[in-house]
Image: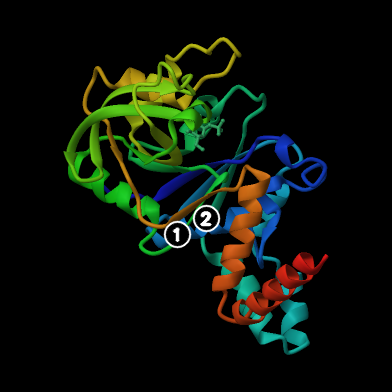
Amino acid sequence: MNLRRAVFPVAGYGTRFLPASKAIPKELLPIVDKPAVQYVVEEAVAAGVETAIFVTAEGKSAIEDHFDRNLRLEAFLAERGKHDLLEVVRHVGTMVQVVAVRQKEALGLGHAVLQAAPVLGDEPFAVLLGDDIIVGHPPAIARLAELGRQTGAPVIAVMEVPREEIRHYGCVAGDLVEPGVWRVRELVEKPPPEVAPSNLAIIGRYVLTPAVLHALAATPPDRAGEIQLTEGLRRCLAAGPVYACTFPGKRYDAGNKADFLRATVEIALRHPELGPGFRRMLEEVFAEVQEK
Ligand code: G1P
C-alpha cells in the first residue's frame, strides 16, 4: 500500500482557542518555532506522503499559503544573505504538493473527509487531525501505513485513556491479534464511560481505503446533524476487517490549551538550540514563583 495522499481537515473555527484563533487559523498558532499544523504535515511527509489535501473553510487560506512557495520572501532573504532562513522558508514551501478543498458547512469529520473524495482517486489515503500532535521517529502514521500494507484494511490509531476521558473520543473495542494491534469489533463515537465498550480512544490518525468513502457517503448525520467518521468506519465492519493499533511517539492534544502549553514546553526543552537556555529559564521562573 503506497500512501501518497493525506487529508488534513482544517475547517473548524477553533473555538477553544478564541480569541487567539479569531483572525488566525488555530492550526497556525506556533509551537516553539513552527505552526502546529506543520508538525502534522511533516509527520505525513516523513511517512512518504506527497500530496496534502487540506479540507478548509473561509478564513483558512493562510494554511495553504504556509506550504506554498513565497518567491518574493525568498528573493528578499537571498538578497540580504540570510541563507539559513531562506533554507527554512524553501523547505516548508516545497515539502509537499498542496490541494485545498472546501467544507462549505460544519457537518462533521466524516463530512470533511468526504469533501476530499473527488481528489483522492482509487487508492488508500491517510487522515491526520491537527489537534493531535505526535512527535518522534518513526512517524506514527507510518506505523498505520505498514499495517495497512500488510492487511489491505483500514487502520485507526488508538491509545488507552482513563475511562472517564473516553467520552471525548471515538472508542474502539476489538480482539487483540498481536501486541498493540486489534481487529475492531465495535466502534462508538464519544460514549459515556458507563457504557463505553473499552478505554481505547481513537487518536487522530487513520489510514483509509476507498471503501470507507463509500460507507461515509451512505452514513446519515447524527443527532447533532454531523456525519461522523467513526460511524462511517463502523459501517465498514460488516464488509471486512478494520484494524486499530498503537503508535510510536509522544502525543499531545493540541486542541486543549493546557496540553498545547505542555507541547510548547516539552518541545522547547528538546530543541537543540533553545533547550538548554530554556531549561535554565524555567528553573529561574520556578524559583521566583516559589519565593513569592
Ligand atoms: C475526532 C473524532 C474522534 C477522535 C478524535 C481524536 O473528534 O470524531 O473519534 O477520537 O477526533 O482527536 P473531535 O476531537 O474532533 O471532536
Position of 149 relative to 84 (above/below): above
Residue shown at 72% from the left, 46% from the top: 25
SS of the residue at dot 2?
Answer: helix
The quarter of the rendered structure image containing the C terminus is: bottom right
Q: Is residue 61 left or right of residue 189?
A: right
Disc 2 to disc 1: CB gap under 8 Å: yes
Total marks placed: 2
Residue highlighted by disc 2? 41
Q: Which mark is residue 94?
A: none
Q: Is residue 228 left or right of residue 213?
A: right
Label 2 lies in ligand 1 vicinity (Cβ under 8 Å): no
Residue highlighted by disc 1? 45
Q: Nearer the viewer, residue 107 or 79?
A: 107
Label 1 lies in ligand 1 vicinity (Cβ under 8 Å): no
| Res 214 seen here | no
Residue shown at 41% from the left, 34% from the top: 201
Residue shown at 51% from the left, 26% from the top: 167
* Label 1 CA crowd tier, 10 Å (few <14, some 14–19, many 20+): many
Q: Quadrant of residue 36?
A: bottom right
Position of 196 relative to 222 (above/below): below
Question: Spatial distance from mark 2 to mark 1, Cα to Cα?
Answer: 6 Å
Amino acid type of disc 2? Val
Q: Residue furthest bottom?
A: 81
Amino acid type of disc 1? Val
Q: Is residue 270 left or right of residue 292?
A: left
